[in-house]
Image: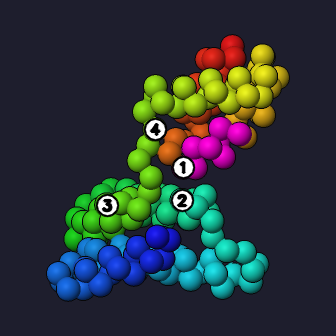
Amino acid sequence: MTLQERITDDLKTAMRNKDEAGKRGIRAIKQAILLQQTDGSGTTLDEAGEIAMLQKLVKSRQESLEIYEQQGRDDLAQPEREEIEVISRYLPEPLSDEKLEALIKQVISDTGATSMRDMGKVMGQTNAKVAGRADGKQIAATVKRLLG
């Protein structure tokens, strides 16, 4: 089931249950998908693109949330928290440190990497395999530790 199909089904459920936060979060995702589809590039969203788009949505909501919290505007902060929670449901589960390390060890073995000079190659292949389940800093730190 694609992201678009999942959110369409979930939007129907949110509407039936009168879940305002669910409706807002899902509509934000639908808008982001529509923007991607109509940006003129002609590209379609693959899984990695969907994950990147969702991560950008969460990040923008978190930035707004920080501002509202600094201003003491809980009336505006609460809807942002709720949307972050809804959007985050569609992101893949993060990899544990152990699973990430095992995956990176496999990439190192597959690529024949032996030193820090090979870090770029290992990072590129690891990023493709984790598809948003680990952030770049976490991957880089693990690669450095394993190749260092």
Residue 6: give x, y in percent of width and height. Answer: 41, 73
Rounded to the nearest angstrom, the CA distance separating label 4 from label 1 is 9 Å
Which circle, 1 or 3, is nearer the viewer?
A: 1
141 to 17, vertically: above or below: above
Say which label, 2 or 1, has the lower sequence index: 2
Label 2 secondary element? helix
Q: Quadrant of residue 13?
A: bottom left
- Compare residues 36 and 57 and report the one nearer the observer: 36
Residue 77: give x, y in percent of width and height. Answer: 28, 65
For label 4, the residue is 95
Q: Is residue 95 left or right of residue 119?
A: left
- Residue 129 located within the stretch drawn in magenta: yes
At x 33% / y 65%, what residue is drawn?
86
At x 40% / y 75%, what residue is drawn?
7
At label 1, counting other C-alpha atoms closer than 10 Å, the crowd grade (few under 14, some 14-19, many 20 or more) is many
Residue 25: give x, y in percent of width and height. Answer: 36, 73
Q: Which residues are magenta?
A: 125-132
Q: Main secondary structure of the magenta part?
A: helix
Q: Is residue 56 visible?
A: no
For label 2, the residue is 51
Say which label, 2 or 3, has the lower sequence index: 2
Say which label, 4 or 3, has the lower sequence index: 3
Residue that sits furthest to the top in the current view: 148
At x 26% / y 74%, what residue is drawn?
21
Q: Is residue 126 left or right of residue 27?
A: right
Can you tell which mark lies on residue 132? 1
For label 3, the residue is 85
